[in-house]
Image (tube, rainbow, N blue to C red):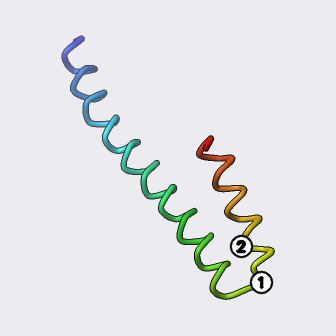
């Protein structure tokens, strides 16, 4: 019974890590897109939000 849960945990951990990576990349792409498409002020606010979310 315990081995079954261990296998499930081993499957779910990489899925969550990949999901977090995709979300992080999406936020970076959004910041770059705002910088290119719109005003620099909006891009700066996006970059600041990104830095806060990544605790830099």
Kindly identify which numbered label has been placed on residue 22.
Answer: none
Q: Position of residue 9 (x, y in %)?
A: 31, 27
Q: Position of residue 18 (x, y in %)?
A: 36, 50
- In the image, residue 56 sits, relative to residue 37, either above or below, namely above
In the orientation shown, which residue stands out farthest toward the top?
2
State which quadrant residue 10 falls in.
top left
**Depth check: 27 or 39 in front?**
39
**Depth check: 13 or 45 in front?**
45
Quarter of the image where the N terminus is located? top left
State which quadrant residue 37 falls in.
bottom right
In the rendered structure, the answer to whether residue 31 lies left or right of residue 25 reads right
- In the image, residue 11 sits, relative to residue 40, either above or below, namely above
Q: Position of residue 43 (x, y in %)?
A: 71, 73
Report, in whole angstroms, how far the alpha carbon at label 1 lies from the one at label 2.
Answer: 7 Å
In the orientation shown, which residue stands out farthest toward the bottom?
37
User: Crowding at label 2, few (<14), some or many (≥20) Cα neighbours within 10 Å?
Assistant: some
Residue matched to label 2: 43
Residue matched to label 1: 39
Q: Residue at x 44, y 58 (%)?
A: 22
């Amino acid at each position: 019974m315990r081995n079954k849960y261990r296998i499930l945990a081993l499957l779910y951990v990489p899925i969550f890590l990949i999901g977090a990576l995709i979300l992080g990349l999406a936020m970076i792409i959004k910041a770059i897109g705002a910088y290119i498409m719109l005003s620099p002020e909006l891009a700066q606010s996006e970059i600041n939000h990104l830095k806060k979310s990544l605790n830099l």
